Image (cartoon, rainbow, N blue to C red):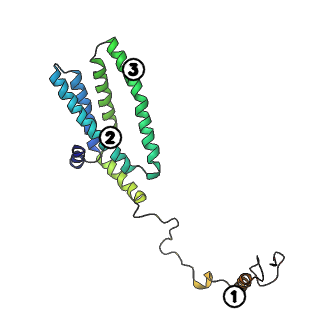
Amino acid sequence: MGIASFLGRRLGTGTAPTCTAAVEGLAVLGLAAAPNPYVAGLALAVCGAGMGATMVLGPSLRQAIVAAHLMGRVASTSRMLAMCAAPFGAFLGGRLATTYDIRTPLYTAAGLLLAMTALTATMTTNHRIEAALRATAPADDPEHPKSPDPVPEGAAQPSASSSSPAPGRSRARNRTSSGATVGCLTPRPCGHERRRP
């Protein structure tokens, strides 16, 4: 958590996850080419640190730019894609290791991860992320809720004479509240009046 927050402040909201994902890919590549267990252990440690930072920065960014009413759908879709890809990756890795050698799945994983990082790097620049944050902040800020029916500035306000009912209609309402007539708002008798018993 401390590394992720430090990288977010130093590199920016969009660049930090891209850099940590690139570190993961390079660490996996170093693991594939490790000549001894010490280098392999160091590569695994770097990969774990990069993965931990990415798992903090990525969801935090998603929670900041996704609307509150879509958060559940976006999070569940992301998790479903990750879980569905895991069995496919395990099958492909086992197939490559059986067909070639144990290093081939690692090279393949490093290549795919670096390619995906390069592909999404232009979509997660600091400029784009900051623009998305500015666009979503007013709508999602609970301290500044939007008015359901805002009145534009300069619009004519209803006057007291237009908002107050006519004298005849007021008398009709008074008669209704007193129990004389129900359902008629005009002072003249009409065919839709109902007398209370």
Q: Label 3 belongs to which residue?
A: 91
Question: Which type of secondary structure does the marked residue at label 1 adopt?
Answer: helix
Q: Position of residue 122 (x, y in %)?
A: 32, 40
Tags 3 and 2 in contact by the CB under 8 Å rule?
A: no
Q: Residue at x 50, y 68 (%)?
A: 150
Relative to 33, is 118 above or below? below
Residue at the front extreme of this rendering = 197
Q: Residue at x 25, y 36 (%)?
A: 50
Relative to 68, is 26 above or below? above
Q: Amino acid at mark 3?
A: Phe
- From the viewer's perspective, is the residue at label 3 or at label 2 nearer? 3
Judged left or right of residue 3, residue 122 is right
Q: Nearer the viewer, residue 133 or 42?
A: 42
Q: Residue at x 47, y 73 (%)?
A: 153
Q: Position of residue 18 (x, y in %)?
A: 28, 39
Judged left or right of residue 68, residue 113 is left
Q: Picture quarter containing residue 145?
A: bottom left
In this orientation, does residue 124 appear?
no
Q: Amino acid at mark 2?
A: Thr
- From the viewer's perspective, is the residue at label 3 or at label 1 nearer? 3
Quadrant (top left/top right/bottom left/bottom right) for the N terminus: top left
Quadrant (top left/top right/bottom left/bottom right) for the C terminus: bottom right
In this orientation, does residue 192 appear?
yes
- From the viewer's perspective, is the residue at label 1 or at label 2 nearer? 1
Alpha-carbon span between mark 3 and mark 2: 31 Å
Tags 1 and 2 in contact by the CB under 8 Å rule?
A: no
Q: Identify the disc placed on residue 122.
A: 2
Q: Identify the disc placed on residue 167.
A: 1
Q: Identify the disc placed on residue 140.
A: none
Relative to 152, is 137 above or below? above
